[in-house]
Image: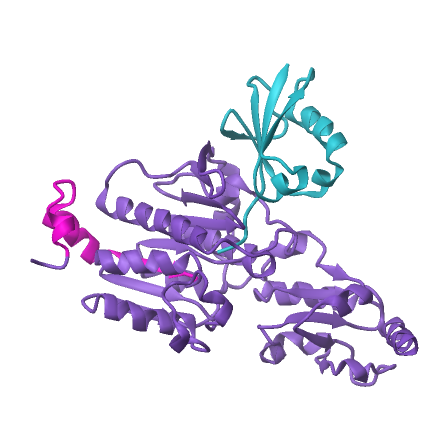
Chain colours: A cyan, B purple
Amino acid sequence: MQLTIKYFGLIAEITKRNKEQFEFSGTLINEFLETVYLKYPKLKETHFQVAQNNEIVSKETIITQTEIALLPPFAGG
Amino acid sequence: MTRYDRHIILSEIGQKGQDKLTQAKVLVVGAGGLGCPVLQYLTAAGIGTIGIVDFDVVEKSNLQRQVLFGTSSLGKNKAIAAKQRLLDLNDTISIHTYPEKLTRKNVLELFKDYDIIVDGTDNFATRYLINDASIITNKPLVYGAIYKFEGQVAVFNYKNGASYRCLFPTPSKEGAIPNCSEIGVLGVLPGIIGSMQANEVLKIILGLGNILSGKLLCYNALTTQTTTLIIHKVESEIKKVLSKKESFQNTVEELNCNFNPPEISIEDAFKKRNIQFIDVREKDEFPKVDSLNPTHIPLSKLENNLHKIDLKKKKIIFCQSGIRSKKAVSILQKHNINNSYSIKEGASEILEYINQLHKQQ
């Protein structure tokens, strides 16, 4: 399955892009993240939440949609 | 024509709506990049009672985005300086200032007197404190946060809706996500995000439109794109907060105890600017590291000597082995004093490093 992954804030800085495509054949978000970590090992230590099709979900969720977003918290004000 | 004529002639607001604004009480925590536009629009709109919490003072580097302040405000407390400007904008409303830090001790009492809370703070410890206190006091929380060119806006705890902990259950490591003073921010960005927060406040009071509850709006100033993400309420997170209701004021902040306090090597510590060195050893411990000109506060007396901590500087803490200094950082975080680092090395190694530096020169 071809997934589009969107990056926000600090995550986009690590990946140096706002979005990209990933080929993925597994089931869970967690498994997919392992694929992403292979490309960006630094993300492994970064705090973020995952959205699937614009809905915040747990990392144990089954991937049913093609759009995933990685969202870090922002501290600034 | 009256001051609020352009509101009143809107059929969706009218005199009735304007009266609701007059009766409303809104507390804005943080009069910085976000707080300034929020306060400006709420004051102009005629919110009858506004509270401003901020312990900080206006610095020159704030003026690039904190639009309530000018050169005449430099060095003044932000809450007080903001009030002066706001009363010139609208002297028919009441503005209460709280030039102090928000803590577990004062937060519940403060929130009690207001209908809506606005989060315009710049650190995770205070953001979680505000979230938890909003749940306990059952107040809607209008949240905003920024990072360089991006912003987030949401309304939490609105009619028993999702909270910040439903989005991010636990805080990030303090220091892991830099704030504006560390990494910079596009000046107009908090203006945009703060204005969106003010808009949500007005909608809540007026009962207009769709409230940004259960949703997180993400704005990117460079691409001018917005993404709205759905946040589901996580009952267990809210219950966890409510279960601590009784002991809330008396418990020590457990927020930052889940992770290791920021550690730093002596080499990196020397690269930092604007720092206060703090030696948390007892008086009779050797070797002394006098060349750093440290402030001496034994760990056992730290909590009673917080006034000796320079809030405007980065705190670099050391001890005999790097263990007590770590504990000291946790204690400071508990009191919402951030920007503190523990040197990994002990005093002997620090001294040796300094001697090496001198030899090289």
Determine whether A19 is above or below B251 in the image. Answer: above
Q: Nearer the viewer, residue B279 or B37?
A: B37
Magenta segment includes B20: yes
Determine the residue positioned at 48% across, 58% down.
B121
**Along the horizontal axis of the image, is B289 left or right of B183?**
right
Magenta segment includes A20: no
Determine whether B186 is above or below B314 in the image. Answer: above
Name the quadrant containing residue B207: top left
Determine the residue positioned at 62% across, 80% down.
B308
Quarter of the figure with the C terminus of chain B = bottom right
Residue B204 can be seen, yes or no: yes
**Along the horizontal axis of the image, is A43 left or right of B191?**
right
Q: Which residues are the magenta region?
A: B4-30
Give the image location of residue A31, x and y in percent. Answer: 70, 24
Q: Nearer the viewer, residue B348 or B304?
A: B348
Residue B135 can be seen, yes or no: no
Determine whether B350 is above or below B259 in the image. Answer: below
Determine the residue positioned at 74% across, 65% down.
B342
Quarter of the figure with the N terminus of chain B = bottom left
